[in-house]
Image (tube, rainbow, N blue to C red):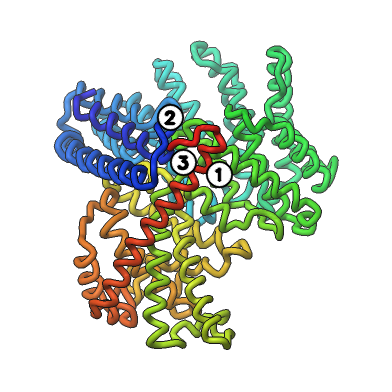
């Protein structure tokens, strides 16, 4: 690699390391010492981010702009650089990885180098698959663009199968077959679509003609992994019910994987892994051998086998992913929930404890995937951890920057609401739950509570995109801006499905939508139909101010003072922001009160994180931060 590429990678790793907010092994620190350290780490991260943008502008972007003129050595270095950004189970910068491989694919098409085209299509497809995995919780139509992009790459590479005889390179032949298998990745409208693709792949891989033409490929491994894909094709969605033919097609693969893993476990004198055991139980259920009640019982037995101190892929699957599937089945029949409330609570407690103890948690993509799954399927009961608290716990663990930002917006929103209702006591009476309160003091308390809770939860959907918000070390690319927009849809969907958070779903959905409807996102938010639109407007304004002055400097390249942000908000009066709010920003005393709320909210958020980490360290027997 070139020096700028090596420096860029080093900065990415340094920024990932500084995302650890818990200073293990350090001497005990006071809050002030810890806060000074955190501010210093944040400043260093921003400096590395700026340096990385310099490296890209000076080193990479000029090469990409003139990619057709690049020499072979330069192209090879780009490929090696991309391999460091995403590879070997490590994700450092998937967005830049896709940019580079897209450029290399353009070169391969220009030169009509078939082997390079196939390789680059496969690599780009893998990058898009990695991005797609962040979209848990979105509807099929909302994620279809990302799935289609991924499948187009794999589908085009797989189409070169008709030239298998002409292509003599073993590695390229392997890319063709792997691409054919990977067409089945992602969601489908109905299970049979995916199952038919996997069946076709198995037929190709088991064809003796292909095997004899290329004996150097690991055919047995390809076939086994494709059986795993088939076994994973079981639909756990109530909307996508499998047909009897779907079940029949899956059964053989489930059995093959199950028997092989049992044999491997026996040979190694260890317990069978949980994933094939789960698939086996599930397919028996779909075959009609037993009902949902017994399936849940078998899942409980599997989850009880999971070791909370096992941080291997199987332990991770057993503690978190099986819990997510268990909740998904409970959502099929809510009547099965009440007698399992205590057990559900124990599962959630175990998950949170497991997450806190997980080594190098910020680097494990499987952990994030399974947590996204559980956040989507979470079943809230009367006695379990409220969904609101579960999400905030994950924020403190994995996106503390988002937690701080949410706390700042929450406190500023409460302060702004206090200013408003002193002048207009009925300002929030569009909200039914507030309008029905007759006692003025009780109404004030409810408004402040609603403002704070809205502020804490409006960005919940960012948990789906941890890499964008907590691990970036440069400004976002255009595609990443586009993906960041999806946090509103994810957050709204998560919140509206649970009693403790349903009231805040409109705020999560609409806080980036413009007041006049001319711009913003998502289009599904209709301001005039939203009863709590005044609160959505407030959160949207205060979120924007804190973004452009504090939290979005690295991602967006913006650097404004608080006063500059207020002036720009006023300039956008009646367009992006409600004139009922911006008119108050013309009052210097109001601006000072809001600014003070930001400062105090930020300090309070840091204090909460400090105390939370102290408590966790004491549990570990260290007591130091």
Residue 437, numbered label: none
Q: Secondary structure at mark 3?
A: helix
- Determine whether, in the image, residue 8 is placed left or right of residue 489: left
Q: Secondary structure at mark 2?
A: loop
Task: Provide residue 562's location: percent of width, then percent of height.
Answer: 23, 64
Q: Is residue 65 visible?
A: no
- Determine whether, in the image, residue 24 is placed left or right of residue 52: right
Tell me what residue is drawn at x 24 percent, y 75 percent: 570
Residue 371, numbered label: 1
In the rendered image of this protein, does residue 583 appear above or below residue 86?
below
- Crowdedness of circle 3 by 10 Å Cα count: few (<14), some, many (20+)? many
In the rendered image of this protein, does residue 363 appear above or below residue 581?
above
Task: Provide residue 261's location: percent of width, then percent of height.
Answer: 69, 22
Quadrant that contains the C terminus: top left
The image quarter containing residue 586 is bottom left
In the picture as drawn, the residue positioned furthest to the right comes out as 289
The image quarter containing residue 493 is bottom right
Question: Which tag is nearer the camera, tag 1 or tag 2?
Answer: 2
Distance of mark 1 from mark 2, alpha carbons?
27 Å
Question: Which residue matches tag 3?
Answer: 151
Task: Provide residue 207's location: percent of width, then percent of height.
Answer: 59, 21
- Crowdedness of circle 1 by 10 Å Cα count: few (<14), some, many (20+)? many
Distance of mark 2 from mark 3, alpha carbons?
46 Å
Residue 25, numbered label: 2
- Determine whether, in the image, residue 538 is placed left or right of residue 109: right
Task: Provide residue 134's location: percent of width, then percent of height.
Answer: 47, 45
Tell me what residue is drawn at x 38 percent, y 29 percent: 118
* Circles 1 and 3: CB atoms closer than 8 Å: no
Looking at the image, tell me whether mark 1 or mark 3 is earlier in sequence order: 3
Distance of mark 1 from mark 3, alpha carbons?
25 Å
Looking at the image, tell me whether mark 1 or mark 2 is earlier in sequence order: 2
- Crowdedness of circle 2 by 10 Å Cα count: few (<14), some, many (20+)? few
């Amino acid at each position: 690699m070139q020096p700028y590429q090596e420096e860029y990678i080093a900065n990415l790793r340094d920024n990932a390391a500084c995302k650890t907010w818990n200073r293990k092994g350090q001497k005990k620190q006071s809050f002030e010492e810890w806060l000074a350290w955190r501010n210093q780490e944040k400043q260093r991260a921003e400096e590395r981010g700026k340096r990385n943008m310099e490296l890209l502008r000076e080193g990479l972007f000029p090469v990409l702009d003139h990619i057709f003129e690049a020499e072979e050595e330069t192209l090879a270095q780009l490929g090696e650089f991309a391999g460091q950004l995403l590879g070997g189970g490590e994700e450092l910068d998937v967005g830049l990885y896709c940019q580079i491989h897209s450029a290399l694919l353009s070169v391969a098409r220009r030169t009509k180098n078939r082997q390079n085209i196939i390789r680059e299509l496969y690599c780009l497809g893998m990058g898009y698959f990695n991005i797609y995995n962040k979209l848990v919780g979105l509807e099929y139509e909302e994620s279809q663009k990302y799935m289609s992009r991924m499948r187009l790459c794999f589908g085009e590479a797989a189409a070169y199968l008709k030239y298998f005889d002409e292509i003599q390179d073993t590695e390229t032949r392997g890319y063709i077959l792997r691409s054919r298998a990977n067409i089945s990745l992602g969601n489908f409208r109905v299970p049979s679509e995916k199952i038919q693709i996997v069946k076709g792949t198995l037929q190709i891989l088991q064809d003796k003609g292909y095997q004899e033409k290329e004996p150097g490929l690991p055919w047995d491994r390809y076939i086994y992994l494709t059986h795993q894909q088939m076994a994973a094709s079981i639909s756990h969605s109530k909307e996508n019910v499998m047909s009897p033919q779907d079940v029949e097609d899956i059964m053989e693969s489930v059995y093959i994987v199950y028997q092989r893993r049992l044999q491997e476990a026996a040979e190694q004198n260890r317990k069978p892994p949980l994933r094939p055991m789960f698939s086996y139980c599930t397919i028996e259920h779909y075959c009609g051998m037993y009902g949902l009640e017994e399936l849940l019982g078998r899942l409980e037995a599997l989850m009880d086998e999971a070791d909370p101190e096992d941080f291997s892929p199987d332990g991770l699957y057993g503690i978190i992913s099986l819990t997510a599937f268990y909740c998904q089945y409970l959502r099929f029949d809510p009547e099965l929930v009440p007698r399992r409330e205590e057990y559900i609570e124990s599962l959630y407690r175990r998950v949170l404890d497991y997450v806190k103890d997980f080594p190098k948690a910020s680097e494990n993509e499987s952990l994030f995937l399974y947590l996204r799954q559980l956040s989507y399927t979470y079943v809230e009961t009367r006695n379990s951890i409220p969904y609101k608290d579960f999400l905030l716990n994950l924020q403190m663990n994995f996106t503390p920057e988002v937690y701080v930002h949410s706390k700042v917006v929450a406190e500023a929103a409460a302060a702004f609401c206090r200013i408003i209702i002193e002048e207009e006591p009925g300002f929030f009476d569009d909200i039914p739950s507030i309008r029905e309160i007759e006692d003025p003091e009780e109404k004030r308390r409810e408004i402040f509570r609603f403002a704070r809770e809205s502020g804490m939860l409006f960005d919940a959907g960012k948990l789906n995109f941890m890499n964008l918000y907590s691990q970036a070390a440069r400004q976002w690319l255009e595609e990443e801006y586009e993906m960041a927009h999806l946090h509103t849809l994810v957050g709204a969907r998560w919140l509206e499905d649970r009693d403790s958070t349903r009231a805040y779903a409109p705020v999560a959905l609409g806080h980036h939508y413009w007041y006049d409807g001319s711009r913003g996102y998502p289009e599904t938010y209709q301001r005039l139909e939203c009863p709590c639109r005044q609160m959505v407007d407030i959160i949207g304004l205060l979120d924007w101010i804190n973004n452009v002055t504090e939290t979005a400097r690295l991602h967006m390249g913006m650097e404004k003072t608080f006063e500059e942000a207020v002036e720009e908000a006023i300039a956008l009066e009646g367009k992006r922001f409600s004139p009922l709010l911006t008119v108050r920003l013309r009052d210097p005393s109001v601006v000072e009160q809001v600014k003070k709320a930001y400062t105090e909210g930020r300090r309070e958020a840091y204090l909460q994180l400090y105390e939370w980490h102290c408590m966790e360290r004491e549990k570990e027997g260290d007591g130091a931060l």
